[in-house]
Amino acid sequence: MEIRAVFFDIDGTLLTDNRSVSPSTIFAINQLKEAGILVGLATGRDPRFILQYMAALSLDLAIAYNGQYIFSREKVLYADPLQVDDVRSLIQYARQENKDLSFGTASGVAGSGIMSFGGGHLAYRISRMIPESWAGLVNFIFNRLIRRLRPQKEANVEEILQQPIYQLLLLATEKETTKLQGRYPGLEFTRSSPYAADIINKGGSKLQGIQRLANQFQFGLDQVIVFGDSNNDLEMLEGVEHSVAMKNATRKAKKAASFVTDSNNKDGIFKALERFGLVKERG
């Protein structure tokens, strides 16, 4: 088995629950790079968030916004913004339903203060402790109570829309997401948490992002290993032969993967790569 590239999801996979990269993962990535294997990220996160890890770990490639924006350390390789009409329609929906939206641009995520808080370290740690069955209550608290304290500024939205939008993030339950998918057939609604939906163009995904890079760098999907833990990783985990779900992954992610490793807190990445024969313990 010749592996040419390895891609990691970030939250719950590359990062531990205290939002750090474990020493064993750093050691493994260094071994991969020494072997000439491309190492990248495949995430719903924005380029600004990703760049800190690309720089710290000397990573080669990044698939941001669930495949909508792809770049290397040198340049942007692919970008597929949402249609302005779709963005404005979803803004109108969010206003009618008293929901905040965040807007994913090339420079980062802007818009809702609530959603920015939700993507932070504290909110991430809290979300790991809250059962998925509480998703409706969490959405109610954020939309009806916290929104009053941190309202979204309308003037700021118009300013944001002067640049391309690659992904929208909407605080919504899975039931609401299903209804929206029927209302917007030209869009894709994927979920990295029980509380929010990532909205991208139809057909976009982490898997499609990996396929684009495979075409450009001339390797096959059978020469790739992917790691993930969330439901927005499902297509990637199902579509790549050598796919790994973390022990802390969702039930659907584990079912989709070809192998389940240990958790993000217990050297899961290193253990899986060791099983594939790509890394070795320190001598």
Image (tube, rainbow, N blue to C red):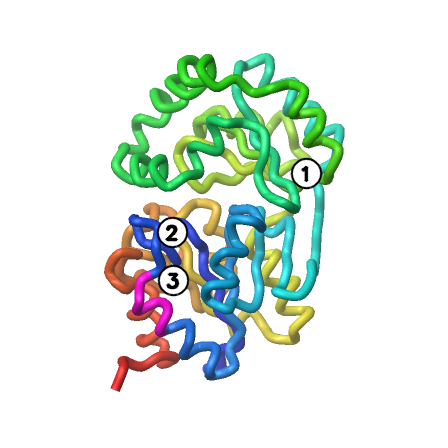
Q: What residue lies at 56% left-to-right and 68% top-to-bottom?
A: 60
Which residue type does callout 3 highlight? Val
Which residue type does callout 2 highlight? Asp
What SS does tag 2 mark?
loop
Q: CA distance from mark 1 to mark 2?
A: 26 Å
Which of marks 3 and 2 precedes in the sequence? 2
Which of marks 2 and 1 precedes in the sequence? 1
Q: Residue furthest bottom?
A: 283
Which of marks 1 and 3 precedes in the sequence? 1
Residue neighbourhood size for the residue with mark 3, other residues' Cα within 10 Å, grouped as few (<14), some (14–19), many (≥20): many
Q: In x, y percent, where is residue 112?
A: 54, 27
Report the residue marked by disc 1: 165
* Tag in front: 3 or 1: 1
Drawn side of residue 126 relative to residue 228, left or right:
left
Q: Give the residues drawn in magenta, as a range.
A: 22-27
Report the residue marked by disc 2: 229
Q: What residue lies at 68% left-to-right and 36% top-to-bottom?
A: 186
Q: CA distance from mark 2 to mark 3?
A: 9 Å
Q: In x, y percent, where is residue 253?
A: 38, 51
Q: Is residue 253 above or below residue 101?
A: below
Q: In x, y percent, where is residue 227?
A: 42, 60
Look at the magenta stretch and give its main secondary structure. helix
* Tag in front: 1 or 2: 1
Q: In x, y percent, where is residue 197?
A: 50, 34
Q: Is residue 87 above or below residue 75?
A: above
Report the residue marked by disc 3: 244
Q: What residue lies at 31% left-to-right and 67% top-to-bottom?
A: 23
Q: Is residue 14 above or below residue 60?
A: above
Q: Is residue 180 magenta?
A: no
